[in-house]
Each structure stands twice: as structure tokens, then as C-alpha cells.
Amino acid sequence: MESGPAIFTGVVFALFGAGLAAWTATRLRQRLPVAEGVRPVAAATLAGATALIALALGVWCFARL
């Protein structure tokens, strides 16, 4: 019974991390700002780090099964 919430949480983290990484990469490739009003390097770094952390949390949730 405890695997259901772990699977759901892992999927949410993995989808969020993958979506954020893809969105950030697309914005950088098109030379568009990642966040309005923020320095481009800082915004890209923070978004990339957040995506990697979310993906790592998703992997960790799946490893706990």
C-alpha cells in the first residue's frame, strides 16, 4: 500500500524536472529570457539546478520502492 504514494510522488518529480529542463533548454537555445527581470545566467543556473534536484528526487522516490 505504501508504494502507491511513492510512485505518484516519483512521477510528479520526474515530470516536473524533465519539463523544467526542456523548457529552460528551449528558452536558452532561442536566446529568450528564462525569467523576466533576472540576470540570464542566474536564471538559467537556478532553473537548471531546480530541474536536476527534481529529477534526483524522482529517482530517489523510485529507488525506495
Image: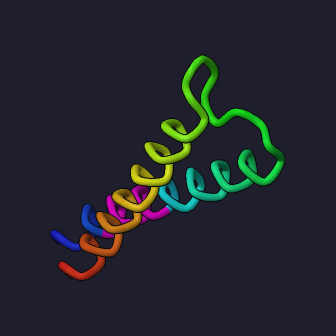
Relative side of 59 to 18, left or right: left
Q: Is residue 10 magenta?
A: yes
Residue 19, horizontal then vertical, whole percent: 59, 55
State the image quarter where residue 54 is shown: bottom left
- Residue 61: x percent and y percent? 26, 70
Residue 51 within the segment the image draws in magenta = no
Q: Residue at x 48, y 37 (%)?
A: 42
Apparent side of residue 23 relative to residue 39 in the rendered image (left or right): right
As drawn, is 9 to the left or to the right of 46?
left
Viewport quadrant of the C terminus: bottom left
Q: Nearer the viewer, residue 49 or 42?
A: 42
Q: Quadrant of the N terminus?
A: bottom left
How far across and how far down the image is residue 18, in percent? 55, 62
Name which residue lies at 25% across and 66% down. 6
Which range is magenta? 7-14
Query: Main SS type for the magenta part?
Result: helix
Residue at the outermost top position: 37
Give coordinates of residue 48: x percent, y percent: 49, 53
Instruction: State the residue in front, 52 or 65.
Output: 52
* Coloration mode: rainbow
| Number of on-image labels | 0
Q: Residue at left 68%, top 56%? A: 25
Q: Is 42 or 61 nearer to us in this picture?
A: 42
| Quarter residue 64 falls in | bottom left
Q: Residue at x 83, y 47 (%)?
A: 30
User: Is the residue 50 above or below the residue 15 in the image?
Assistant: above
Rendered position, 50 above or below 40: below
